[in-house]
Image (spheres, coloured by chain):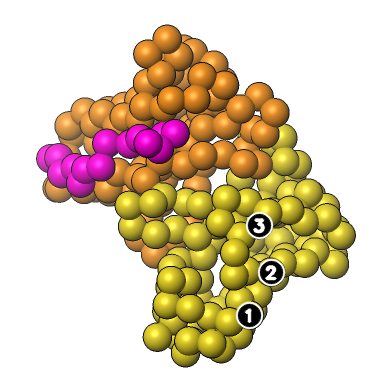
Amino acid sequence: NAGVTQTPKFQVLKTGQSMTLQCAQDMNHEYMSWYRQDPGMGLRLIHYSVGAGITDQGEVPNGYNVSRSTTEDFPLRLLLAAPSQTSVYFCASALTISGNTIYFGEGSWLTVV
Amino acid sequence: QKEVEQDPGPLSVPEGAIVSLNCTYSNSAFQYFMWYRQYSRKGPELLMYTYSSGNKEDGRFTAQVDKSSKYISLFIRDSQPSDSATYLCAMSTRNTNAGKSTFGDGTTLTVKP
């Protein structure tokens, strides 16, 4: 059972480059989300989705785009990478937004130089 | 001021010790309280979930919620080296549950053999 799968695990980007972090879940979960984790700032919600075709902003959405064309996939796009986006990114899913359990992926370590 | 404050640690204890991990919060609307365990270079995984005030026990782990003091704790009895990880508290309101939880910054625990 794969759960929540993120790729790539590690990435180095130059300032101004763009890239997409991929996230897929095989649990037929309605809710998917992206967090970033930084020292001293905990996990902060970037964007989330409550179903295919529906996305919304979280606490720190600036500089990131998302789309949800299928239930399974929820990619996070960085259009113009900045050093401030150096972080660890986690994709997560739950059965519904009101579900009690979030399942996290293993993380994507991104460095922007 | 952050909505959720977590004892920063790090915490280092000998094997077999009782560990107490703590969080305070300011939002009285929080009703769902979670503890996540995060091993190094891995995503968080749900450890304990509690609704409203009271205690919940699961094996060596006990989660305690005191809503009157806006204080939650996680106790680990007979701590093991395999408990070495970062522990994150998380909280959510009645309407959002897991979907938009607010996380603490985490406390890193090391259990020495």
Q: Which mark is residue A79?
A: 1
What kind of element bears circle 1?
loop
Q: Chain of mark 3?
A: A
In the rendered structure, the residue with mark 2 lies on which chain? A
- Tell me which label, 3 or 1, sits earlier in the chain: 3
Whole-number angstrom distance, CA of label 2 to CA of label 1: 8 Å
- Marks 2/1 in contact by CB < 8 Å: the verdict is yes
Residue range corresponding to the magenta coloring: B1-14
Type of amino acid at the residue the image marks with label 3: His
Residue B33 part of the magenta-drawn span: no
The residue lying at 37 percent from left, 36 percent from top is B1
Q: Colour of chain A?
A: yellow
Query: Which x, y percent locates residue A41?
Result: 39, 51
User: In the rendered view, would you say A58 is above or below A88?
Assistant: above
Front: mark 3 or 1:
1
Q: Amino acid at mark 1?
A: Leu
Q: Which chain is rendered orange in the image? A: B
**Figure check: A3 above or below A19:** above
Question: What residue is pinned by disc 3?
Answer: A47
CA distance separating discs 3 and 1: 15 Å
Task: Give the residue at mark 2.
Answer: A65
Measured as percent of width and height from the top left, residue B70 is found at: 41, 19
Give A84 or A99, whichever is nearer the viewer: A84
